[in-house]
Image (cartoon, rainbow, N blue to C red):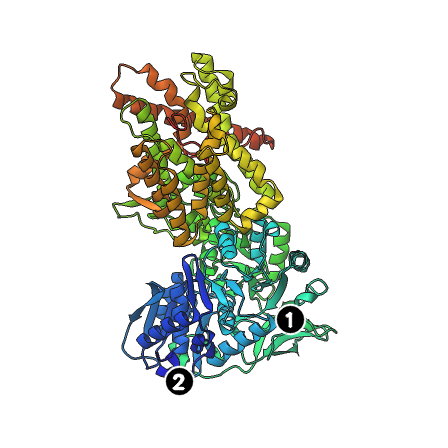
Amino acid sequence: MASPIDLLPDLRTVPLARDLADHGDRPALLTVDGEISYRELAARVAATARRLGTRRRLVLLTTGNTVDAVVGYLAALAGGHPVLLAPAEHTDTLVDAYDPDVVLGPGRQGTPQVHERRDGSTHDLHPDLALLLSTSGTTGSPKLVRLSHTNVQANAEAIATYLDIQDTDRAATTLPMHYCYGLSVINSHLLRGAALILTDLSVADTCFWDLLRARGGTTFAAVPYTFDLLDRVGFAGMDLPRLRYVTCAGGRLAPDRVVRWADRGRRAGWQLVVMYGQTEATARMAYLPPELAATRPGSIGVPVPGGSFRIEPVDGQPDGTGELVYTGPNVMLGYAHHPADLRLGRRVAELRTGDLARRGDDGLYELVGRRSRFAKICGLRVDPQRVETVLETHGIRAACLGDDDTLIVAVPAGTDGTRVRRLVRRECGLPGRAVRVLVLDTLPRLATGKLDYPAVRQAAAQQPDSAGTETDGGAGGGPVDLCRLYAEVLDRDGVTEQDSFVSLDGDSLSYVEMSVRLEQALGHLPAGWHTRAIRDLHPSRQPSRRRWRALETSVAVRAAAIVLIVGSHLPVFHLKGGAHLLLAVAGFNFARFQLTGADRRHRNRHLWGSIGRVAVPSIIWIALAWALTDDYRLSNILLLNAVLGPHDGRSEWHFWFVEALVYILLALAALTALPWVDRAERRWPFGLPVALLVVGLIGRYELFGLAAYPDLPSAVVVFWLFALGWAAARATGVAQRVAVTVVALATVPGFFGELGRELLIVAGFALLVWVPHVPGTALLNRVAALLAGSSLYIYLSHWQVYPRLDDVPRWLVLVACLVVGIGVARVAEWISGRITAVRRSTGRRTVPAGWFSQGRGTIRPGSPTAAGGRPRQ
């Protein structure tokens, strides 16, 4: 097979894209679904390059950390076509501004979709031009950086050299591909024959760490804000045995944090590499040798191999301090403001960084300020002047300035601060916490009439944020508006766009309501929404016109199960097995919502809260039923019937499911509190539940003499179902999903001796494993949410409802049981809300929030969506 370069022998290409096949069968791209070797990647690149043709054309690529995006990018470089990388949200803007000849979009089976806008090219393209990038933070701006083939190759070689990238390394794509820092990770690792773990997951998502461990990740890239997220998810306590180093760029990491993180890395066996760069230098210009991080944390280090710095004097600065100027083979050709600039060659010989710096006696460079007003905030380079201009087009006069953490936007009194924040965030792509709106009586000005920025900064130091946190909005709004929805459903303050459902300690209780309300707000339910940051959810601003909407399979299973269970008890029909299926669902949700990336202590606190949310309302209800009906005993109230008996009463078995679930969760709370078990779970997320499943099968088959004890607690007998659901949630890839399905097919039959019940459990479990969503409608989804969310209370109360309606048709009794249970859930929710309000007003935590409520009609991890019958009855 001809290589892409053979197709265009007279054109300049980038060697790292051209020579992929030289790395043979080594893994190149690793995803959740499998891996692609360099040989296979080279073949896909060659095939796409052939589709692009032999005549140079301007290619625009809609980026994402996906196989098809990487293939499209490499195909353009290998085929000699200049490629413009565009994030999905700004593709249309850049298409209008630069009129590309070809647009590569998301495709299928790892191949990009090729949309040819014309046969040839309408552009005059300079032979050195290889890559076009927006400067970080202005991804929607028509101002682009023009980079040559030499720039791309030279910077990749420099980075690979000082990081000592090896062909055994595996780097996770923690940053966007269209961002020069994220792209440099791809280039430098492909250059050395290393592997890329392709993912768009945030480090705040437990699934990211599952993938990193499963794929043997050795490194990932971070910006300063990433370290905030790492603190939040308990990174310091994670077991990552293959991690070699973590890189940091995209803004200044405070010296004390450099020291702290470098020390953490030293103790854990990995290194912190602090770097400095700009898009205009392709990516990197300097790095701090990791052994110097503890002694010189405020320094950017030394130039990358092949580059050099000089300090150019600046008026008003002391001797030895001036503007940092960089020279090297990675310096851009120049800027492009419109398509005609694509014909230009080199217009820049050296790069004036705009940063004020000095060189220490040890040869290390240190930044001391900015010559211009540009600021780098959360890894994004922001031009305050441009922000002022944009606001002015909306009739708002403002004075903007920034530092490494915050963009301050001062506006005169009478200006809507929330609107200002929204406009600024839309323009800059900054998180809400990084935009501070300062409302002043008037904007301070100098005698010349110019804005007095030092006075604005002084006012900012003396006045708190005037606009507060923006969380307003409703259904159909943008990602910013979803913050209030998350805060309402999860009962959390201070929700920001960086948060995700998992990072906010969401669980199966809130998952039901959140999934349904999110689907209503967005018009669709994004895949993996519970692990994605709010900012990454892209809603349709118009109401959905689709008749069918997605319903989370676990929600559908819960809703159906509670109806089947109550209906079988009346009886309206005889479809048993729902309670046992829900044990698998409980294990499934335990893995998703309890075993997050947070540290061990946080996990354990979260699990104890979930146990309380099942046990406390059950105890209260059973006690009330005992006082009014005398149906139960003290052992029922204390959820100890399985231990203390009696085992042959007419009603004692009513709550076997709650008892079994509470016992299982208590055992797991004790087990996962052990440091070595916590480490084992993080290192072998699929292996540990499989091992526990094997242990659980002892109870399922009553081995080692257990058959001699007919009154074994239900938890011992049915734990294997819980472990099976846990393993299903941790299954990555087809092979592991097939494995857990085969185990279900092998172990469920024969447990009851009733074919219908066993088929129901296996079918429901297979749906859970293989079908993330089932079709529904807006009304059906809402009904399912009510049923699933109120299921604990439906289960608890139906025992007291249906015996008192003997003369009523059974279908009406079923409806009555469901309605009463939903009503009880609403009362419990109101009580919980009142307790929470009192707790907040007094500043004391009287009881864990949500113990008396299922929170907007949902269920907590493993909470019994309903049950009935003894383990085998």
Of the pair 347 and 259, the residue shown nearer to us: 259
Mark pair 2, 1: CA separation: 40 Å
For label 2, the residue is 11
Residue 716 vertical placement versus 411 (above, below): above
Of the pair 586 and 302, the residue shown nearer to us: 586
Label 2: element kind: loop
For residue 534, say whether it is visible. yes
Q: Residue at x 35, y 48 (%)?
A: 770
Label 1: element kind: strand
- Amino acid type, residue under disc 1 in the picture: Leu
**Are discs 2 and 1 less than 8 Å apart at CB?**
no
Q: Quadrant of residue 69?
A: bottom left
User: Which quarter of the rendering shows the C terminus?
Assistant: top left
Marker disc for residue 356:
1
Of the pair 753 and 726, the residue shown nearer to us: 753
- Amino acid type, residue under disc 2 in the picture: Leu
